[in-house]
Amino acid sequence: MSGAHDIADFVVIGSGAGGATAALVLAEAGHDVIVLEEGPDVTAADRGLGPTEAFTRLFRDRGAQVAMGRSVIPVLQGRCVGGTTVVNGAIVWRLPEDAHARCFGAADAQDTYPMRELERCFDRIERDLSVARVPERLLGGNGRLMRDGAAKLGWRGHAIRRNVVDCQGSARCLEACPTQRKQSMDVTYLPRATKLGARIVSSREVRTIEVRGDRAVAALGRDVLGNSFRVEARRGVVLAASAIQSPCILQRSGLGGREHVGAHFTAHPATAVMGVYPDDVRIWEGATQSYEVDHFRGEGFKMETASLPLELAGVRVPGLGADFRNAMADYPRMAVWGVQVRAEAEGTVASAGRETRITYTPTVRDMERFRRGVRELAKMHFAAGATRVLPGVHGGPVVIASVDDVAKLEDISIDPRAYTLIASHLFGTCRMSNEAHDGVVDLNLAVHGVRGLWVVDASVFPTTLGVNPQHTIMAVAMIAAERIGESAPRA
Amino acid sequence: MIVIGLGEGAQRRLAVLLGDMFGEDERVSADVASFLDAYLRRAPLVPAVGLRVAIGAMIWLPIAFIGRPAPAHLLDEATRRRYLEAWAGSRVYWIREAFYLVKAIALMGWGAHDVVRTRIGLPPVAAERSAA
């Protein structure tokens, strides 16, 4: 699209898991589709450049987006063609039945999104994205140690299923795969949609949606140079800008009601615990995230390996000067494991001029899960042979030197300010509901009270999922887009 | 457009503290200070302001933390260490976080530095293009 104005059957806002899937399904159904992406294209020259360049080029707010509450929690999101799928760990989780019942049951939507329909979409997505378990050779030292530790403790765990073809094990998923093996949306669904005639337009920030009468008719915004644009939708606008940006666009447009748009912001916050081993772990080799322990999923938390690059691993390593330098000399022998909590806390997202304000504070129960998770991770590190563990909780023991000392972690603080948390799975800010007074979109993901406007991203989920969400986002977007393509009103 | 950065003087003063933080020599510390300047110039305004204020506070506030009326870079090494420990271990969350904010961003420059990566035995920060 070269001009400031254009027209299509459907305007899709956002090119991540939800937007790309919706665009492909609509294009396959023969519709004329334009995808508007706020971020830039991802070129070969942008890939695998290290964390600083990745944050600067590919992440929202250059990696500096945070949620404010009792503590400051970084909120990581991709902002590029392909969205967060370009910079995530490529983890694919089929939604378990208990999570389906909990999440969709909360909106009485189990029959609208039945497991068999989701399974049909999961099957297709897994074929399309070549989903497979991490093979032994790519577990890396980090994954093998977690596997060994879990096995010794009798905990359930498994190699992670990922959307990667012939992974080279460079542990650089978060920097955009340098060899383009990760099957992110920019190398899969978006090119496929393009072949079917869809137009993907990068560096176009949608600010508002224009409504005429009760019908959404166009997306309005500006490009990187500040020039305004208007893209008209003959049949509808599909909003898939994430649980942060979708509610902001609706708020600026005065759509979706005041009570629920941007409310009910939920997430899976996470923290990491490092273990130091006698032999090399070489965390920079293997799949970025290769092994997980879901033994405690029923209790609200899950553990994963995380190949933290040197630049990020040092943040909570204690000590100054030579002490710090000596501690970081152990980096080749460090394993880094995270605990991700299915948090109950609800925050808010609001558009405030040029900024986005996110508020979020984990509840006491969430923090109790973190305390438990940190303790169990420490235990697993020692079971795997660690000589010492760095729990990274302020006010608690800086270093734990034996499994007998893990008990010291039973009394560590549950104040969020004592932990280094990040949030990367974000939900709920345009939640689905049967009734307009209880949510933002109906069960077919159409915005209540507006014709020709849908939301198809993680913002529609009424609760957290408790598992990595990309797969479910894509499956729900697929089902919704099929229905949208069949039912959307002609202009 | 407002651009925030670190002047040469600020970089020089900060480099002294970075040397104390990471235990690196003057050259590496100066490079990390230069990295912070470049980072600030590219960062969104609000985070850049926060980081710049934190850096300024760390340089100029020994009087508030340890009662010494001098900028941090002019203190002797042992006193500077005591001063930085006061930041890192503060009971006040926002002070502690300010320290970790500076440390976290500085680590991006530190961890990408060739000298550091070679010493630890890591490959270069950017993936080799031949692997692509």
Image (cartoon, grey):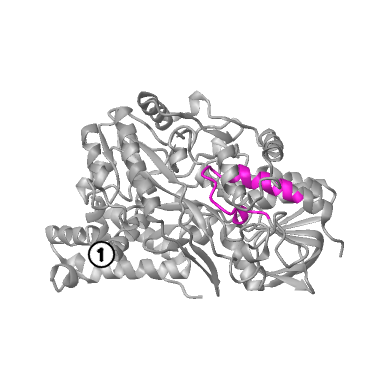
Neighbour class for label 1 at 10 Å: few (<14), some, many (≥20)?
few
Q: What percent of the width, then of the height, locates residue B18?
A: 27, 57
Q: What percent of the width, then of the height, locates residue A323?
A: 20, 46
Closer-to-camera residue (B96/A463): A463
Label 1, on which residue?
B92
Report the number of numbered marks.
1
For residue A162, which quarter of the picture? top right
Quadrant where the N terminus of chain A sits is: bottom right
Rendered position, A26 above or below A140 = below
* The magenta stretch spans residue A230: no
Range drawn in magenta? A456-481
Rendered position, A425 above or below A218 = above
Rendered position, B79 above or below A23 = below
Q: What percent of the width, then of the height, locates residue A26?
A: 79, 50
**Badge 1 element:** loop
Mark 1 falls within which chain?
A: B
Say which amino acid is labelled 1. Val
Q: What percent of the width, then of the height, locates residue A191?
A: 72, 45
Closer-to-camera residue (A411/B39): A411
Q: Is residue B6 visible?
A: no
